[in-house]
Image: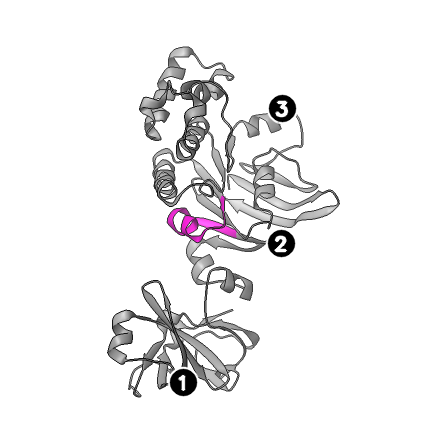
Amino acid sequence: MILALENISQRKNGQQILSDVNLSVSRGEFFVLMGPTGCGKTTLLRIAGLLDKPFSGRVKYQSEPIPHRGKERLQARRRMVTVFQRPVLFRGSVFSNVEWGLRIRGIPEDEINRKVSQVLEMVDLVEYGDRDSCTLSGGELQRVALARALVIEPSILILDEPTTSLDPNLRFNLLRRLKDLHSQTGITFTMATHDFTDALSLGTAGAVMRNGRIEQMGTIDEIFYRPSTPFMASFVGMKNVFPAEFNADGAIVEELIIRHTSNKRGHGFLAIPPEAIVVSREATVTSERNHFTGIITSVERTGSIFSISVDCGNLLIISSVTRSALSDLDLTEGQDVYISFKASAVHVF
């Protein structure tokens, strides 16, 4: 692990912001910290980047605990750079902003010129060296801030919601550039975001925060496709999440017995992805172990996909179908239909 936070708590003005947070980031990862606004992401990043000290707990860099003061803390802090959501540049040229970290480290002039030119090329700002920083657009400002961070070749680059204030075009370009930079440099990236697109397009691992605590941590696939709690299932947008009682026959949800592939017993939850649910006008013979009848209560368009809500007794189950499938089946509200899905499609937690 290049970075570890152990039992981190933080209080501000008598208010508990973070509570016993444990988090670890492996070398070379693109680690994405997710969570709703106000959950404590920025506070945690400031502690991780050694900009703030925690109320309790400790930060470890390359497996070594970082003291709250002194030379060791300063040396570790110089190996990390934090780029904030709205970065602030100095007055002067783009070049003078980017070279600043090298100059205060006493790097020779010829090496400064080489490194700055190299990093400006990486962020596609080769022609911007002489530009006044006050004339930059939001996207250009972000790229200069990235160049200023990358030029000192940090071990860890920390990004606090870098795409939030950008329009969709600039946001897409920045995401693509961050992915390329991570691949090119091999630097460990840690980024906070509340946008799933950022996490799915960039992240190799991550964590989700809720009310100052870590709700779940793991690979991006584990977080999005194997949520561990009802909150996580809701956070990643899972539909058809139901409390259930599990026994040898399956999961009892209201009056239905839903077959699944886990060995769970007792109380828990299950989720059925809408795209895994087949809706038909007639009973079909398939290998799917779950078959129910119901009545369509609504047909709603969500982008290019339609959500079909089916009332199966006391349980409302949502299926997703394409426009062509909707048209072929001639599905409308009030119709009696059959739904089916595989036991392996049922997620249990």
Rendered residue at 46%/51% (across/down)? 195
Mark 2 falls on what kind of element?
A: loop
Q: Which residue is mark 3?
A: 71
Rendered residue at 37%/26% (across/down)? 119
Closest to the camera, between mark 3 and mark 2, is 2
| Badge 3 vs badge 2, beta-carbon distance below 8 Å | no
Displayed quadrant of residue 99: top left
Q: Is residue 207 left or right of residue 299?
A: right
Mark 3 falls on what kind of element?
A: helix
Rendered residue at 70%/48% (across/down)? 16
Colour setup of the view:
one colour
Residue 36 on image: x %, y %: 55, 53
| Badge 1 vs badge 2, beta-carbon distance below 8 Å | no
Q: Amino acid type of disc 1?
A: Ile
Query: What are the residue bounds of the magenta stretch?
Result: 192-207
Q: Which residue is mark 2?
A: 211
Q: Amino acid type of disc 3?
A: Lys
Q: Which residue is mark 1?
A: 295
Mark 1 falls on what kind of element?
A: strand
